[in-house]
Amino acid sequence: MIRPEGRVRIELRAPGDRMLADRLRRAARRLALALRTPALLALSILRRRAPAPPPARVSRILVVRTDRLGDMALTTAALQDLRDHFRRAEITVLAPAPSLDILEGHPAVDRRAGLDRRGLPDGFVGRFDLAIDFTPDASLRGALLVARSRAKYRAGFAASGRQALFNLKCPPADPRRHVFDLNRDLVAALGAPPRAERPSLFVTPEERGGARALLAALGAASPRVAVHPGGHFPSQRWSPERFGDLITLLTGRTGAACIVVHGPGEEDLAERVCAASPDALRAGPRSVRDLMALLAVCDLFIGNNSGPLHISGALGLPTVSVMGPTDPGRFTPRGPADRVVRHDLPCSPCDRGRCWHHTCLRGVEPEELLREAEEAVKSLRPREEAL
């Protein structure tokens, strides 16, 4: 009981902004880009844009990708278009080693060169007639590499002044367009008709045979479903425990063999999935090529927005993906058998790498993915019969 003469002090405090640090980083980046743009454009104000090069004048092409596996997978259609247009040219791809691994055996690629902190490899300066940076945003790294190549023709996307480093017409890096379509825009600006309708990757019969042997050792009969719980950013990852619940439900309803795959640094995620479901089969650590072969002999892929998702699409594997902060208009797989589960929220898509509440993915229930996966499994025949 409070005495009449006593006083009660009520203190109201506004909740702290848990995203303050992220907001400040984003504001600082916007300011830096705003200051950078006029400075870069001033450097090229007197520079004349060259016309698109005729195929006869291009004997060596350098393609630059400085980012990750999924980005390279989505670039393979553009590589094929370049091969079809510049038929006599040698095409070299400069990229981080894992991204180069997925291009092994690709008919549009003649040479692969590893990208490291040193920048351009020895002998690359002055070697190429045409250099192309497929980075679809404001990042400068790829644009600088193309500029330093001293290629006669240099191309890339226009964003925050980076077009000053190129001398060909630059399509805008429109954040509202799908990355696949942006790549087609850049190919078209080079005078090459963008005819390839989807990304493409290839594995050898020997690689497929090794993957089938692994699945047989695991006791994985058809239908075989590859489940990948990883993603580059934490905010892209659905809960591993919910992946485990999904595996239990899917195995019980369809008899599917669910194989949990992971990349370097994702071991803990795979362990949590397997701990949450007795039906999960773990494939163990795999190289990029081994992962590709395993995906190639599965019937369905389930996972987050990640490199393996886009590799699966490029291999022709039907996919069911769960997306939260990822912009579906920019990165959604677009094959006829691809399905996406997401909740349309006021804050999503935000493209943030971190989030304190993660409502967009926490609200997605295993039953939602189960419905899509069941429909996908019903429409499948074992892919081994078709390959």
Image (cartoon, rainbow, N blue to C red):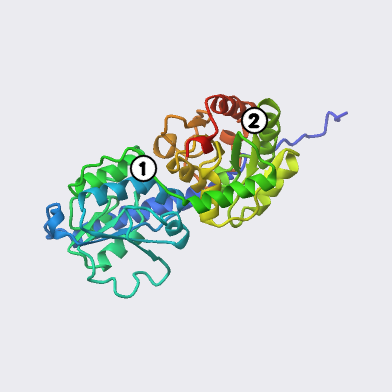
Q: Could you say which is closer to the camera, residue 50 or residue 285?
A: 285
Distance (Cα) linking label 2 and label 1? 28 Å
Q: Element type at marker 2?
A: helix
Picture residue at 59% right of the left edge, 24% below the top:
371
Residue 253 in the figure: left or right of residue 344: right
Q: Residue 64 location in percent, x, y?
A: 33, 59
Decide if residue 21 is in sight here: no
Residue 160 in the figure: left or right of residue 278: left
Mark number displayed over residue 205 = none
Q: Amino acid at mark 2?
A: Pro
The residue beneath circle 1 is 179
350 w.r.t. 269: above or below: above
Q: Residues within 10 Å of mark 1 (few under 14, many from 20)?
A: many
Q: Could you say which is closer to the camera, residue 303 or residue 312?
A: 312
Q: Residue 68 location in percent, x, y?
A: 45, 54
Q: Amino acid at mark 1?
A: Val
Position of the N terminus, as image quadrant, is: top right
Picture residue at 56% right of the left edge, 26% below the top:
372
Q: Which quadrant of the structure image shows residue 120?
A: bottom left
Mark number displayed over residue 366 = 2
